[in-house]
Image: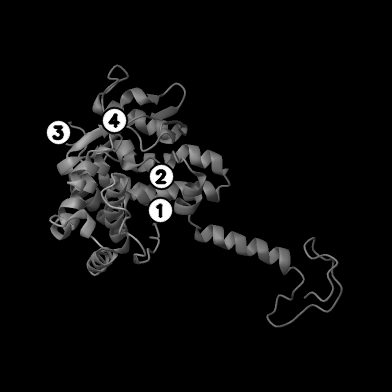
Amino acid sequence: EVVTYWLGSNPGKRPSGLARDESIVRVHLLPALADRPIGAVTPRDVQGLVLAWSAQAAPRTVHRQYGVLRAILNTAVNLDLIARTPCRGVKLPAIEQRESRIVTGDDLVRLGDALGPALAPMVYLAAVLGLRWGECAGLRVCRIDFLRSTLSVAEQRTRGRAGEMVKGSPKSQAGRRTLSVPPPLMAMLGEHLAGRGVTGADADAMIFVGPRGRPLDYSTWLHRSWQPACRAAALEGLHFHDLRHTNATGMVAAGIDVKTAQARLGHSDPRLTLGIYAQATSEGDRAAADLLGSLFMARTSAEPGQHRTRSEPSSSVGEGVKGGP
């Protein structure tokens, strides 16, 4: 009864989030707790569930399932059905941050060729503009301004109940954004639409459609287009979201300020921009090593284990410090 109330209590919940929560409740919570009085659930019961989940699922999945259970029990507290939640002192498995794959320009060319002309621009929208899959799939002709070279993100396609695709708004208000688009990508989009026979008069037409001209379905796209293309491009295991990670990392590596990167990615918090998406690249790491070496080791010998003995001009860093190398 509490679960039923909780699932229907948030009118602002997105269809994809509601579908995920319903699945967790049906598969992982109700089989264990459905017939239990809400006041009979103890911290020991909750910890037992977490341990059982941890033996079968990844830590991130366990955290997601526990989060749903905790929200339901917090609702019971708010309804004065129980005095305090049993989600107290529960130990959860540690989450290891997944290292996203950073692709190159050559990777994008191979991937685009493998996807074919009907879908190839999607990989560039993700890597160059940082668009999510749902934002690419929900893009319409009216959102592209060829005169100003801009693209607006105003809606997206997501999975709802029973896997049904639904149209929705971006993840947050910050997700509604207008992005400047580089000329080569604008030209690619123009050629893509021309190849489909779509013009500016078709304002509501989708930019990307499936083989029968219908809006993209994620599951069909994933299994019939994306995964085969990744294998053909020698990029097996690549996630579409990795292209968005590549975009963020590229902006950080290029020295683009955090506020601009945050706005282009549609993040409401700049810490998300840096903490989750910005990964150090091998080129950036090498450049940092060379810079620090030139700053702090300019007076050392080029040969290992030897120090210069003659007087040399000191570098600006550490100048005046005695006893240095």
The amino acid marked with disc number 2 is Ala
Numbered label attached to residue 148: none
Judging from the image, what secondary structure is the residue with disc 3 in?
Answer: loop
Residue depicted at x 70% and y 83%: 305
Q: Image check: 278 left or right of 217?
A: right
The amino acid marked with disc number 4 is Ile
Disc 4 to disc 3: CB gap under 8 Å:
no
Disc 1 to disc 3: CB gap under 8 Å:
no
Residue that badge 1 annotates: 103
The amino acid marked with disc number 1 is Val
The amino acid marked with disc number 3 is Arg
Name the N-terminal-most of marks 4 and 1. Answer: 1
Residue 105 shows in the view: no
Q: Image check: 280 left or right of 187?
A: right
Name the N-terminal-most of marks 1 and 2. Answer: 1
Give the image location of residue 120, x and y in percent: 30, 41
Q: Image check: 260 left or right of 301?
A: left
- Report the quarter where the C terminus lies: bottom right
Name the N-terminal-most of marks 1 and 3. Answer: 1
Disc 4 to disc 2: CB gap under 8 Å:
no
Residue depicted at x 80% and y 60%: 316
Residue that badge 3 annotates: 212
Numbered label attached to residue 207: 4
Q: Is residue 166 above or below residue 97?
A: above
Name the N-terminal-most of marks 4 and 2. Answer: 2
Q: Dot 2: within a 10 Å radius of its alpha carbon, few (fewer than 14), some, or many (20 or more) residues?
A: many
